[in-house]
Image (cartoon, rainbow, N blue to C red):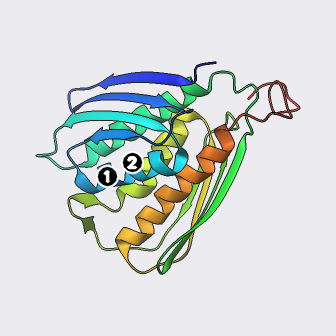
Amino acid sequence: MSRKAIVDRVTKETKVHLELDLDGTGISQIHTGIGFFDHMLEQIAKHGSLDLVVQTDGDVEVDSHHSIEDTALAFGEALGKALGDKSGITRFGSALIPLDEALAQVVVDLSGRPYCVHEEPNMVELIGTYDTTMTKHVFESIVAEAKICLHIRLLSGRNSHHIVEAQCKGFGRALKQAVALDSRSSGIPSTKGSL
């Protein structure tokens, strides 16, 4: 069973090409024009054992918002497509990830119902050219397109880079658990019969 997806998202503001393989080894080729965002997507891929290709060409001369948002929407769409009917998946995943002083808790349910709870402190506005207020919006965008439930809480943290990176590593690790095929179960992991 192939659990791969390709998404091309084209607007007047951005052009995104994204390839996702849920059964990869964490290999990524990512170019969004926003260095720190590339680094965070690499963390998701590496710790999620996802193969991920991203090429985003956007209006970064305006700011990074459109490129980040449309890339996150494309990732969520690809995740939903790659999961198919979700037969045989584990469904739930969680991670508690430290990065020096930062500690992030991430829990995911591939429920078919989009819901995002995201809690983090106020941080410096920019990490390089990455707008830190976009982190919540990245996860909201993924959740909306993939139709998953995601809870992220920062339990401690001071450094903005560490805070965002712990969340992305945690999301990758929780997603890895949730998309894993469960050898003890067959069919859809829900009493409803669908997700």
Dividing the picture into quadrants, the one containing residue 54 is top left
Asked if residue 109 shows in the view, the reply is no
Residue at 43%, 53% in the rendered image: 43
Q: Amino acid at mark 1?
A: Phe
- Report helix, strand or loop for mark 2: helix
How far from the left and from the top, in percent, is residue 71? 35, 38
Vertical placement of 99 versus 93: above or below? below
Task: Give the quarter of the figure containing the C terminus.
Answer: top right
How far from the left and from the top, in percent, is residue 144? 53, 38
Vertical placement of 27 versus 6: above or below? below
Q: Amino acid at mark 2?
A: Leu
Dividing the picture into quadrants, the one containing residue 122 is bottom left
Q: Is residue 92 left or right of residue 103?
A: right
Vertical placement of 85 versus 161: above or below? above
Q: Is residue 75 left or right of residue 70?
A: right
Q: Which mark is residue 41?
A: 2
In the picture of the structure, the residue carrying the numbered disc 1 is 37
Residue at 54%, 42% in the rendered image: 143
Residue at 64%, 18% in the rendered image: 1
